[in-house]
Amino acid sequence: MLFPRQGGKGALRLLLSVLILAAWKTGSGQVHYSVPEEAKHGTFVGRIAQDLGLELAELVPRLFRVASKGHGDLLEVNLQNGILFVNSRIDREELCGQSLECSIHLEVIVDSPLQVFHVVVEVKDINDNPPVFRAREQRLFIPESRLVDSRFPIEGAADKDIGTNALLTYTLSPNDYFSLDVQASDELSKSLSLELRKSLDREETPELHLLLTATDGGKPELEGTVQLLITVLDVNDNAPLFAQAVYRVHLLESTANGTLVTTLNASDADEGVNGEIVFSFGSDVPLNIQKNFKIDSSSGEIRLIGRLDYEETKSYEIQVKAVDKGNPPMSNHCKVLVKVLDVNDNAPQLAITPLSLPVREDTPLGTVIAFVSASDRDSGVFGQVTCSVMPHIPFKLVSTFKNYYSLVLESALDRESVANYVLVVTARDGGSPSLSATASVSVEVADVNDNAPAFAQPEYTVFVRENNPPGCHIFTVSARDADAQENALVSYSLVERRVGERALSSYVSVHAESGKVYALQPLDHEELELLQFQVSARDAGVPPLGSNVTLQVFVLDENDNAPALLPRPGAGGAGGALSELVSRSVGAGHVVAKVRAVDADSGYNAWLSYELQPAAGGARSPFRVALYTGEISTTRTLDEADSARQRLLVLVKDHGEPALTATATVLLSLVESGQAPKASSRVLAGAAGAEAALVDVNVYLIVAICAVSSLLVLTLLLYTALRCSAPPTEGACGPGKPTLVCSSAVGSWSYSQQRRQRVCSGEGPPKTDLMAFSPSLPQVPGSAEERQHSEQEHLGKYAEWPKEKDLPVSESITYGLEPHDVALYHKTDVQRKKKNPFCSCKEAASTIQMRRNGGYSGTRLNS
């Protein structure tokens, strides 16, 4: 036997073959198993030890082992139980390819003695491989001019399985142009071709995508597919086609310049230059599109080159033309619809439409004053507007419709409090951040006559000197009406009444427009001290409203009355002269006669003084006259040398400016002491008694005049200060407007009982505005003129009032205090005297007079 000279593996294989052959001859035959491919690890194949007749206990001692030609790891034997099992994946197609039979040959070897067994494991095919085409797609180029029934071969699929699993059937996806033709023979594989059933039109169908499916005969069936891409070759007979007839694009109105709007996709079914496309806007594109957009002629890109504004143009419809470069060129059109999206770039707009301006202050609540409309050029939530008004009172906004409001009166108006309202309406949109706008409306409140004219004071006090010229302006009243226009137009009039026998309008008048009060005739202090009346102020409203003010016109005294001599009852003498009989035995200082005179004026103008005129020839008279009492007394003892008839001229003079005088003639007859008649003695005795009761009356008058002068100066100073701080009033008589009247009875007392302190008051209940006091003088029998003269004599008792006393003389007189009451006053109230002498006088006077049960009388002046 010849052995090839090969080393290594070839020699070993040869030696193994010889041994196996020898063992085969000595073994007991072969064992056959089968297993499906792709069986899992551990799959049972057969009980190989049992089938070979080997005991399990002798497998290990006899070194049981399995050998395979190149596939030793696919199958393995478990020496514990003698079972052959699958050790790793078995792929029939990998082991045997397309061979119909596929087996794994195993050689089982045991020692002691050496035995070799042949085991065949058949690998059965399963349908684990689908049909596979060589390429995923097959391209066919078929001119559109090919005739029907033309055939176009295509490649089939291959299946790695065998038998039925590799038996393939083909199907073609449904279409109108091609059918599948399959040619089969026993010796050759199947031949596939496409058969044209319908004429091709490249413009209609430039390309066909067909799906060829190959299905094997396995269970389950497996498929394989291939795409058939059939391109119909072209002739230049097609215009460009856009991918979309209408392109829709949405852009924010805030989009920046240069932004790409869209890219047009157009194609031409032709090829070459016939398929090259040029883009452009249509010839009829509006100018605003050309300003805002541009198109790239080759790429079809449309870009923004202008500014978009949703409020101006909400959308753009752009006509685009695509033209190929064929000859003749062919074109097509499409439309690009650009919709502009709104952004919150517009503030709201307000419009206020007044309905009833100005508004009457008595307008009922709920009245609509104005309409407010708000608008926003933006859309959606950006255009939703809410409105508010400031101030909230007395108006409010009531929504009537979308973005429409009514400005309604919510609370009562008062023009006198607020005459004009400036309302600010704010509109705010719903954007984020929101935009707002404001508008203002001025609401003027129209006046209603709901306020009566009002004076600054309820009453005024005016001082006017008597003997004023007729038509003299004495005062100006002024009333203010808080209303406006005709409702505030005030007219003045007198509240007519009667003053004694005469009408008030005969004394004064008031100018209807200016409020100036005029005295129509000269006023006489001696006739009328106080004229009190009311002036009415009425406005021009409908109905008119009015109010009244009280004027107290005090007529100030002028020295217009000369002293008047009073005849003594029962006195003799011719031509009104006073005749008296005087005893020569009277001593020095004896009162022999008394000159009585009164003055109808008051104050200084009524303060009388008496002066004895020098005798003719300058002879010294043995008589003198008291300066203030008018008493004529002897200066020495009368003797025989004195003339039996003495004629005395007494000058009676007041203290007015200028002073007025009267002259009294006194005839004295000197008689012996026994010749004086009794009647005359009784008369003198009565006169002496009266003189004792009315001693020193002129002293009272002097003190009263001083007090009145002081009060007058103080009043004038206060009046001047008030006049400087207030607008001046014109008038011929210099009217005053003092706000405080301090009246003492001293200044008004001097009329005596004859004038009875005459006061003319207005209508209405009395008010204690002025208190005038007169000393409580004993009533003297006789006429009013005699009683007045007696009062002046009683005032003379105070001529020598103690200067060191703190109690004011004038006020003591006012409250009716006698000289001997002063000491009592000092004992009872020293402290109050130091703080306020005037008030202390009043309180002390009340105390003192209560102790002596009376002492002063008062007269209230009503206002």
Image: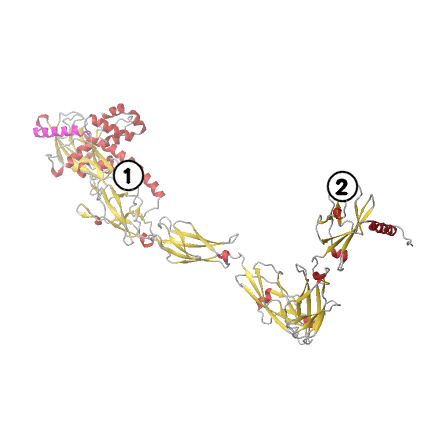
Q: Quadrant of the N terminus?
A: bottom right
Whether residue 366 appears in magenta in the rendering, the answer is: no
Q: How is the image coloured?
A: secondary structure
Specify the quadrant of the image occupied by residue 254.
Answer: bottom right
Q: Nearer the viewer, residue 641 or 149?
A: 149
Query: Which residue is labeled 2 in the image?
Result: 57
In the image as oriented, which residue stretches furthest toward the top? 827
Residue 605 in view:
yes
* Cα distance in 3D space between marks 2 and 1: 157 Å
Instruction: Indicate the position of residue 331 as horizontal and vertical percent values.
Output: 63, 73
Q: Nearer the viewer, residue 752 or 261?
A: 261
464 left or right of 288 in image? left
Instruction: Indicate the position of residue 496 as horizontal and vertical percent values.
Output: 21, 49
Which stretch appears magenta? 675-696
Q: Nearer the viewer, residue 506 or 57?
A: 57
Q: Earlier in the sequence, mark 2 or mark 1?
A: 2
Residue 620 in view:
no
| Circle 2: residue type | Ala
Majority secondary structure of magenta residues: helix
* Image disc number at residue 95: none
* Image disc number at residue 741: 1
Q: Nearer the viewer, residue 570 or 215?
A: 215
Describe the element under mark 2 as helix, strand or loop. Answer: helix
Describe the element under mark 1 as helix, strand or loop. Answer: loop
Instruction: Indicate the position of residue 713 as horizontal and vertical percent values.
Output: 31, 37
Instruction: Indicate the position of residue 703 as horizontal and vertical percent values.
Output: 25, 32
Whether residue 682 appears in magenta in the rendering, the answer is: yes
Q: Quadrant of the C terminus?
A: top left
